[in-house]
Amino acid sequence: MATPTISGSGLTAVETCPAEVQEILHAVTTGAELTFEQGVILAMAQDAALEALVAVADQLRQQTVGDAITYVVNRNINFTNVCFVGCSFCGFGRGPGAADAYSLSFEEVVRRAREAWERGATEVCVQGGLPRDLDGFFYRDLLRAIKHAIPEMHVHAFSPMEIDYGVTKTGMALRDYLRMMKDEGLGSIPGTAAEILDDRVRKELSPNKLPAGRWVEIITAAHELGIPTTSTMMYGHVEEPPDWVRHMLLLRTIQKRTGGFTEFVPLGFIHENTRLYRHGGARPGAKREEHLRVHALARMLLHGAIKNLQVSWVKLGFEMSLACLQAGANDFSGTLMEESISKAAGATFGEYVPPEEFRARIRSIGRVPAERTTTYKIRRVFDKPENDPRTAAAQLPMARTESHVTYTESAY
Ligand code: SF4
């Protein structure tokens, strides 16, 4: 592959860090696929080694995807917060009798999707809790309702946990179920419910959640049927750095087999309103260095496999997002309109950011904003501020059902 290409500030940073880290950083820039052991060394990087990791990840990003920072204009629609699964890291799920339990009608979901379309959204991201009494074909019918009303809207919907639930409820075979959803217009699947793909860790987070092997099976089947998915990892709770490495290497293996991941999204654990943290079972989310380490590590370990690395601004906030976009990431995720997700667990971000604000923030670090589709086709590059559209979309009002605290899982 390419000859060594560390240069500029990256080279200076590399020269000041320990020899074993230098060796790994040089190896990755020449196209070497990093091993688990090399990944763990990078995952523990501190001080000069972390600085070098960040610098080289940024350079690798530049060489792989250039200087554009992409985003999608989308809307999240979380159709219910009623859920029996009881993940300990979740601040969103409610019992059916809770005072703030809600379920949106199909009409309301379609109204929101239509409103989003009229304001320039190309995607709706549709996920929810898992109510016990859900009809077997609920997900299909909801999808059908949206696609019937707005055929061109990309529907990015239903996590592997929800797909698994639909399969169980209908009694269909997994592939038949996925084929049915694809035929109904399912555009892509969020790679949520991944948390850490290791059953030892999953048992601590959520013993009722689908096992890691089932997540892989569903994702792989979706890819093989031509349904792309994202991939995610939740960090900053009970896991250790080697768990990140194992998780990322598993995603790399899947991607090499299927090519179906559009991106990887590290999701920092938002701890405040969660049982996991309150009962002393987890650390209080990641700090700045850990956020940088995880994003830069992902760029290194997924190099040559998954080229898009997304920041979740809802969880990180803008300042930290911009730092991670200079540590290997290249995608700013979605504008989300009203985002009804992360605040339940204590996040302070996540309602609505107009595209013009995304563009201004991207330019503030000397990069080029570009609007993309869900599957990373570039819709428009905003290389000259003077050519930007003049009119700003009005902020959408928060619906009453969304003014409750919201959850951590699916803002991507
Ligand atoms: S993370 Fe999802 S599945 Fe788990 S309790 Fe919350 S809403 Fe339910």
Image (cartoon, rainbow, N blue to C red):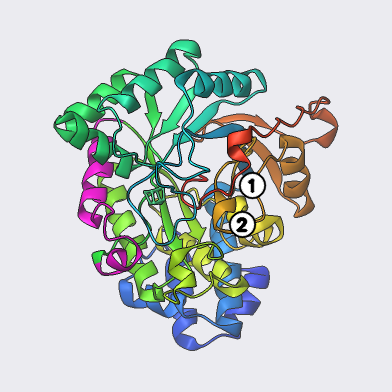
Residue at the (35%, 62%) spot, across then down: 196
* Highlighted range, magenta: 200-226
Q: Position of residue 394 (x, y in %)?
A: 77, 28
Q: Position of residue 265 (x, y in %)?
A: 48, 52
Which disc, if any, is residue 232? none
Query: Can you give x and y, in whole percent of width and height, for residue 275 in the image?
Result: 45, 65
> How many numbered marks are there?
2
Q: Was residue 209 drawn as part of the magenta stretch in this picture? A: yes
Looking at the rendering, which quadrant does residue 147 occupy? Answer: top left
Q: Residue at x 49, y 63 (%)?
A: 274
- The quadrant of the rendering that contains the N terminus is bottom left
Question: In this orientation, which residue lies closer to the viewer: 88 or 331?
Answer: 88
Q: Which residue shows up at 36% across the image and 50% down it?
A: 193
Q: Which picture quadrant has residue 16?
A: bottom right
Residue 222 is a magenta residue? yes
Q: Main secondary structure of the magenta part?
A: helix
Classed neighbour count for the residue bearing mark 2: other residues with Cα under 10 Å, few (<14), some (14–19), many (≥20): many
> Residue 184, located in which quarter of the rendered image?
top left
In percent of the image, x 38 and y 40: which residue is there?
Answer: 229
The amino acid type found where label 2 is placed reads Ala
- Answer whether labels 1 and 2 touch (C-beta < 8 Å): yes
| Residue 347 visible (yes or no) | yes
In the image, 56: left or right of 42? right
Q: Secondary structure at mark 1?
A: loop
Instruction: Give how far across and how far down residue 94 sits, in percent.
Output: 44, 47
Please give the residue where the numbered disc 2 appears in the rendered image. Answer: 347
User: Which residue was labeled with disc 1?
Assistant: 350
Q: CA distance from mark 1 to mark 2?
A: 8 Å
Residue in the foreground of this view, choosing between 399 and 57:
399
Secondary structure, mark 2, is loop
Q: Is residue 196 above or below residue 371?
A: below
